[in-house]
Image (cartoon, coloured by chain):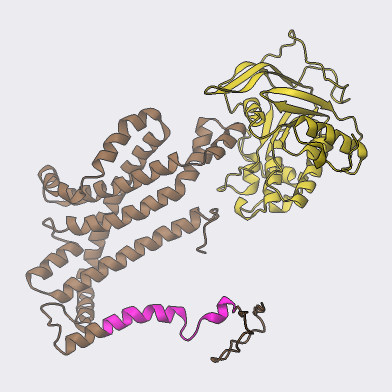
């Protein structure tokens, strides 16, 4: 079998490839296999085609503006909302809510996970109720939250806090319990006490799971935000959307959806950056 | 940890290894037993290791040799009997067990009192020949380098007793030979007592003052290796010792090469 793979001198085969002798195949190195368009171009062509289709459907009237505004209208609405400052203000308010809820819920989730992950007593007290409560759909708590906290900021933040506490709790707890026992043993033979084991072995070992939990929590924070902002909001992206619904402004609704999507992407990038900084030691870590 | 002598010390079967004579024993084990359920893995075992003595422990899989080492490493408290050990001990396991989230040098000084001492770690790593790898993550080390780092981590504690649990078993043949040479050299320099648990009869003969064969939960045979160092596998005396030990391990004669009966 002849293998052609000298990256420096390799010439991509002509379309009509030289036939390999009978019974043998010619292996082609990966970098020479990609034909035609570069990968990023191929990957972006899908969304671009979709927007183009949407645009054509709008201008030809197949897709009426009452059902869904066209991309051109959406872009101009976005520009208008930005010019008036409405959009920025809404984003700041929404982002503030999401972060406040996450900070609260995340802190509670992580603290409870530490309690039940690190101590037998904590596990007995905390884990069973948490496992039970996590199956309750958070959105079902909205009526109760309104009764408890009224219709101001409090129920919105409480909803986000509740929703984000569980993924962090579950993942940090699993991370702590899943730390490689052989490393804990090794730590003990090195003379680490309980506090030293927690600090040098257990918590660093649980960090990958904790970041997975953070990623889930951020995703859920957004979901909870959308629901929360339907509760009698007077500001925020959800409020913009609810307003737009009243006046059938599908363009503004689409703008808000895009904003949610972009914010979601942005926080995901934050988590990726955190992973790059804190998980550089991982054997499986490949993102550079 | 009180050292006790009044029960007497098991005499070595075939003469003295010639090192670390006198002074209190490094390891004193009397009437040690350990059961897992109904199975008695260690059954009333006695063992003495003198300070500075290099002892190799051979035995088939499941004979209890790793259990013994884990008890000596204070990793298994569920034993019966009397065990007296130096306070300063260190273990190197079959897997290097480096903390993947700590740089190599940090792994080496982990658990030492005081602030992590970069220079001290650097010296320990240089001693095992990987001083240039101090600042990398463990994930980029080769198997041999990781095992060297684990050795540096053990020796930086200046132990009086070094426990080695098949530390070369996972290495390839060439790396293993180098690592064995390194351990011999480090032992000569540090002078700590060593208990090496291994499957490899040749390795035991090349490194140890005394080779113990463990069988059915006790030390079934004791073989003093009275050969000058460094030892050579091709030495007929090594081959002869190998034959004797393989017999004790229940391996038939035809497997050994070049050893006369």
Q: Which chain is brown?
A: A
Is A242 situated above or below B174? below
Question: Which residue is most to the left?
Answer: A246
* Residue at 53%, 34% in the rendered image: A196
Instruction: Judge by depth and name the residue closer to the eye, B18 or A83.
Output: B18
- In this rendering, would A191 be left or right of A158? right
Identify the magenta region: A28-52
Q: Magenta span: helix, strand or loop, mainly?
A: helix
- Residue B111: percent from the left, percent from the top? 61, 35
* Residue at 55%, 48% in the rendered image: B101
The answer to whether residue A45 is magenta is yes
- Residue A286: percent from the left, percent from the top? 52, 62
The answer to whether residue A271 is magenta is no
Residue A274 sits in quarter: bottom left
| Mark count | 0
Is B38 situated above or below A33? above
Residue B53 in view: yes
Question: Which residue is most to the top?
Answer: B6
* Residue at 35%, 44% in the rendered image: A170
Instruction: Judge by depth and name the residue closer to the eye, A25 or A159.
Output: A25
Instruction: Judge by depth and name the residue closer to the eye, B204 or A52.
Output: B204
Residue A8 sits in quarter: bottom right
Residue B187 sits in quarter: top right
- Residue A232: percent from the left, percent from the top? 10, 57
- In this rendering, would B12 be left or right of A107? right
Q: Which chain is yellow?
A: B
Is B224 situated above or below A210? above
* Residue at 32%, 43% in the rendered image: A109
């Amino acid at each position: 079998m002849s293998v052609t793979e000298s990256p420096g001198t390799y010439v991509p085969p002509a379309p009509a490839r030289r036939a390999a002798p009978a019974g043998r195949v010619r292996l082609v190195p990966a970098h020479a296999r990609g034909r035609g368009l570069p990968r990023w171009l191929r990957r972006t062509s899908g969304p671009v085609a979709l927007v183009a289709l949407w645009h054509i459907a709008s201008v030809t009237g197949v897709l009426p503006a009452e059902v869904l505004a066209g991309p051109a209208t959406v872009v101009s609405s976005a520009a208008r909302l930005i010019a008036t400052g409405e959009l920025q203000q809404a984003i700041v308010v929404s982002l503030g809510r999401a972060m406040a809820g996450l900070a609260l819920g995340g802190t509670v989730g992580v603290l409870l996970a530490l309690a039940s992950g690190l101590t037998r007593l904590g596990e007995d007290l905390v884990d069973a109720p948490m496992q039970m409560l996590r199956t309750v759909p958070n959105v079902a708590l909205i009526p109760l939250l309104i009764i408890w906290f009224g219709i101001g900021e409090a129920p919105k933040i409480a909803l986000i806090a509740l929703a984000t506490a569980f993924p962090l709790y579950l993942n940090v707890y699993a991370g702590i319990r899943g730390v490689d026992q052989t490393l804990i043993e090794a730590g003990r033979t090195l003379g680490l006490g309980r506090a030293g084991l927690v600090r040098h072995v257990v918590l660093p070992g649980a960090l990958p799971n904790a970041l997975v939990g953070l990623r889930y929590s951020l995703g859920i924070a957004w979901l909870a935000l959308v629901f929360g902002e339907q509760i009698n909001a007077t500001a925020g992206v959800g409020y913009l959307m609810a307003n737009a619904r009243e006046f059938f402004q599908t363009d503004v609704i689409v703008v808000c959806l895009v904003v949610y999507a972009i914010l979601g992407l942005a926080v995901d990038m934050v988590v990726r950056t955190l992973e790059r900084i804190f998980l550089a030691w991982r054997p499986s870590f490949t993102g550079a | 940890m009180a050292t006790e002598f009044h029960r007497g010390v098991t005499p070595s079967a075939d003469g003295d290894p010639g090192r670390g004579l006198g002074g209190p024993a490094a390891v004193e084990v009397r009437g040690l037993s350990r059961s897992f359920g109904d199975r008695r893995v260690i059954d009333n075992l006695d063992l003495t290791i003198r300070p500075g003595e290099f002892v190799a422990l051979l035995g088939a899989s499941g004979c209890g040799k790793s259990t013994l080492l884990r008890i000596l490493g204070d990793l298994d408290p569920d034993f019966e009997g009397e065990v007296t050990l130096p306070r300063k001990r260190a273990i190197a396991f079959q897997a290097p067990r480096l903390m993947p989230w700590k740089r190599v040098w940090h792994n080496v000084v982990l658990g030492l009192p005081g602030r992590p001492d970069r220079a001290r770690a650097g010296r320990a790593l240089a001693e095992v020949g990987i001083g240039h790898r101090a600042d990398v993550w463990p994930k980029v080390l080769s198997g041999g380098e990781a095992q060297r780092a684990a050795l540096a981590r053990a020796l930086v504690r200046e132990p009086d007793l070094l426990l080695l649990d098949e530390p070369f078993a996972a290495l390839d043949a060439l790396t293993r030979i180098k690592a064995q040479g390194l351990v011999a050299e480090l032992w000569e320099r540090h002078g700590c007592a060593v208990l090496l648990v291994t499957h490899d009869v040749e390795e035991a003969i090349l490194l140890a003052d005394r080779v113990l064969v463990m069988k059915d939960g006790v030390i079934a045979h004791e073989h003093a290796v009275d050969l000058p160092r460094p030892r050579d596998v091709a030495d007929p005396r090594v081959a002869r010792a190998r034959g004797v030990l393989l017999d004790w391990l229940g391996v038939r004669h035809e497997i050994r090469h070049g050893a006369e009966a």
